[in-house]
Image (cartoon, grey):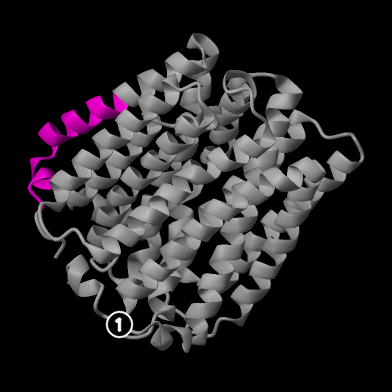
Amino acid sequence: MLTTLDQASTLATSPVALSRHPPLLLYIASRSLSEFSYQVATVAVGWQIYALTGSAFYLGLAGLVQFIPSALLVFVAGHTADRYDRRRIMQLCELTQGVAAFYLALRLLAGTLTAPDIFVVLGLFGLAGAFESPASSALLPAVAPEGMLQRATALSTGSWQVAAIGGPAIGGLAYAVSPSAPFVLMAVLSLVASGLTGLIRVERVAPTKHEGLDGLFAGLHFVRSNPAILGTISLDLFAVLLGGATALLPIYAKDILQAGPWALGVMRAAPAIGALVMTAVIARRPITRRAGLRMFQAVIAFGLATIVFALSRNVWLSIVALAAMGAADTISVVVRVALVQLATPDAMRGRVGAVNFLFINASNQLGEFESGMAAALLGAMPAAALGGIGTIAIALLWMKLFPVLREVDQLE
């Protein structure tokens, strides 16, 4: 049974109670380092692709290359998370990311790095993420102290946002020192994260009793049978799919705003800064009424902020608009997590998490591909502006298609 966000915020009034729980601390440290390492490398990846190709199409292709493994393996990854030790799955994925990043660093230092090298490694990142995300999301309830799942979720989300803020900024600074530095840093942090994951001690999840195709697609059946959940995650899919302007940040930083790697790093961090601020606001003043309507309003605000960013020629206005996009997106995340996490039995959390991860990846990485394609055809500014308009249109359409979602009041 789901609690309201107000109830969830009072489950553990003392952070000391959580700080004395080693499995949760190790989990949060591992997830933060893993995300931090990935965010550090995003600046270098985007800058290198654009420097090597000069093409908006290839910037968008980077998102598609990472999305394809998720789309192909989503059900297998979810079933794997419910059948095997989730910690070991996470370890292997983090190790894969570290080795792949080290390979990029070596190729760059040797002066032989090519765009195909980067895309192969991005494919490995997508493969690792496809298995890591459902395993890690399913592991969180097992490491959280009893009765403190909502507080543990908030703490994990907050640490992820800190990583998303600091990672791109440090990645930009590291790139200014040496183009290979972000990849070396990613490799080191990924390997440390893998080691921390191995130290987590929890009871191993009981293997799922669902076998065959029915068990493999149980997560999809669960989502399809809940109109409010289906409407929530599909809204996020299509809204962010059209509003994926962050894929165009290298173009804005270099050509439109005429800044440099430092601006690219700050702009990549800006959505996470907005998200972190909104997380603090919601923790203080939770969404307790008309949650569905608030989510639709947030998606519309996301679209408006995207339009402002698209038309801006001032770097600081662009940063503010990106921060507003992150803040608006956080509201959608809060509603989605509240509807899904506690409503899902532990034995199928991996498969439901995999379906949710597929939708999230589709909205982010496939959205980058859409933005790159549109920018190649129309130019960066028109493509980003049309994406914001499309996001608003999707929100209005979903209000008609999913009235049950619009009418969600309390998150219970």
The residue at the point 53 percent across, 57 percent down is 131
Q: Main secondary structure of the magenta part?
A: helix
Q: Where is residue 86 in the image (x, y as percent from the top left)?
A: 51, 71
Judging by the rendered image, the residue that carries numbered circle 1 is 13
The residue at the point 64 percent across, 28 percent down is 259
Q: Look at the numbered disc 1 and give the secondary structure of its residue.
A: loop
Quarter-of-image position of residue 118: top right
- Would residue 6 be counted in the magenta stretch? no
Quarter the C terminus occupies: bottom left
Relative depth, front residue between 46 and 106: 46
The residue at the point 19 percent across, 69 percent down is 6
Q: Position of residue 163 (x, y in %)?
A: 55, 58
Relative depth, front residue between 343 and 4: 4
The residue at the point 42 percent across, 72 percent down is 140
Q: In this view, does 28 lie above or below 103?
A: below
Q: In this view, does 311 lie above or below 114?
A: above
Q: Magenta segment, which residues? A: 390-408
Q: Where is residue 76 in the image (x, y as percent from the top left)?
A: 47, 54
Task: Please rate how many residues cluster around mark 1, counting C-alpha atoms within 10 Å: few if below 14, some from 14 to 19, many from 20.
Answer: few
Quarter the N terminus occupies: bottom left
